[in-house]
Image (cartoon, grey):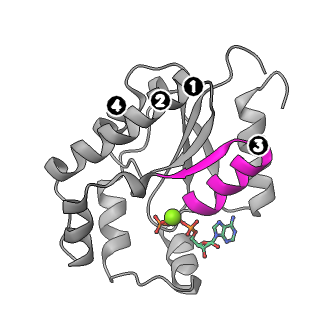
Amino acid sequence: MGSETPCALVVMGVSGSGKSTIGESVAKRLHWSYVDGDKFHPASNVAKMSAGEPLTDEDRWPWLQAIADEIDRLAASGARAVIACSALKRSYREILVHGREDVRIVFLDGTQDLIAERLAARKGHFMPPGLLASQFRTLERPGADERPITVSIDAPIARIVDEIVSQLHLVSQ
Ligand SMILES: Nc1ncnc2c1ncn2[C@@H]1O[C@H](COP(=O)(O)OP(=O)(O)OP(=O)(O)O)[C@@H](O)[C@H]1O
Ligand SMILES: [Mg+2]
């Protein structure tokens, strides 16, 4: 791989945009590890979420910092990973990327209607009504200065993975 190969891809988007599905497939394709960002929540956040209480930004900072620390750890050990994290606001992404050029954002872009359909069909997950609308209100689409890899999710999984990998311009895979 070239020296410009990222150490981490942060796959972002609203709930149901396909972060887990696409993130796992990209990781498999590249032979990188897949990490679900949700596992870095402190116990206090997990308790709040299980009680159905929304997290505040104050709750989110230590969580996002823990993911950023994991990225530094990965990079230092020469490992590479695809990390799923909704990262809806620019301020969240700034913590995750923390100025590292070897961390790339992958934005899963889709309409609220398409994602609502996918969530309705998804098994084993309960989605409170109104959550998707609130995610879209919160979403700050990444700006060009964030060098995002933006992909439309209105395509088969394998095509989306191809698109992400091709936009990475890896020297070899
Ligand atoms: N390209 C696609 N085509 C068809 N179905 C898809 C596609 N991508 C994802 N899905 C389906 O859409 C649903 C939502 O995907 P997924 O669970 O990966 O989203 P997520 O962003 O990880 O959501 P959450 O934030 O709630 O964890 C799943 O049932 C998944 O199988
Ligand atoms: Mg998921």
What's the CA distance linking mark 1 and mark 2?
6 Å
Q: Quadrant of the C terminus?
A: top right
Query: Earlier along the polypeptide chain: callout 4 or callout 2?
Result: 2
What secondary structure predominates along the stretch shown in magenta? helix
Label 1 crowd (10 A; few <14 / some 14-19 / many >=20):
few
Q: Position of residue 45 (x, y in %)?
A: 23, 61
Label 1 element class: helix
The reply to whether dot 1 and dot 2 touch (C-beta < 8 Å) is yes
Residue bounds of the magenta highlight: 19-36
Given the image, on which type of amino acid does mark 4 rest? Answer: Glu
Q: Position of residue 144 (x, y in %)?
A: 49, 28
Is residue 171 shown left or right of residue 137?
right
Residue highlighted by disc 4: 94
Label 3 element class: loop
Q: Quadrant of the N terminus?
A: top right
Label 2 element class: helix
The reply to whether dot 4 and dot 1 touch (C-beta < 8 Å) is no
Q: Residue at x 22, y 77 (%)?
A: 52
Q: Residue at x 55, y 53 (%)?
A: 109
Residue reaching furthest to the top: 3
Choose mark 2 or mark 3, whichever is in front: 2
Is residue 156 shown left or right of residue 83?
right
Residue highlighted by disc 2: 73
Residue reaching furthest to the right: 172
Given the image, on which type of amino acid does mark 2 rest? Answer: Arg
Given the image, on which type of amino acid does mark 1 rest? Answer: Ser
Q: Position of residue 95 (x, y in %)?
A: 32, 32
CB of mark 2 near ligand 2 (< 8 Å): no
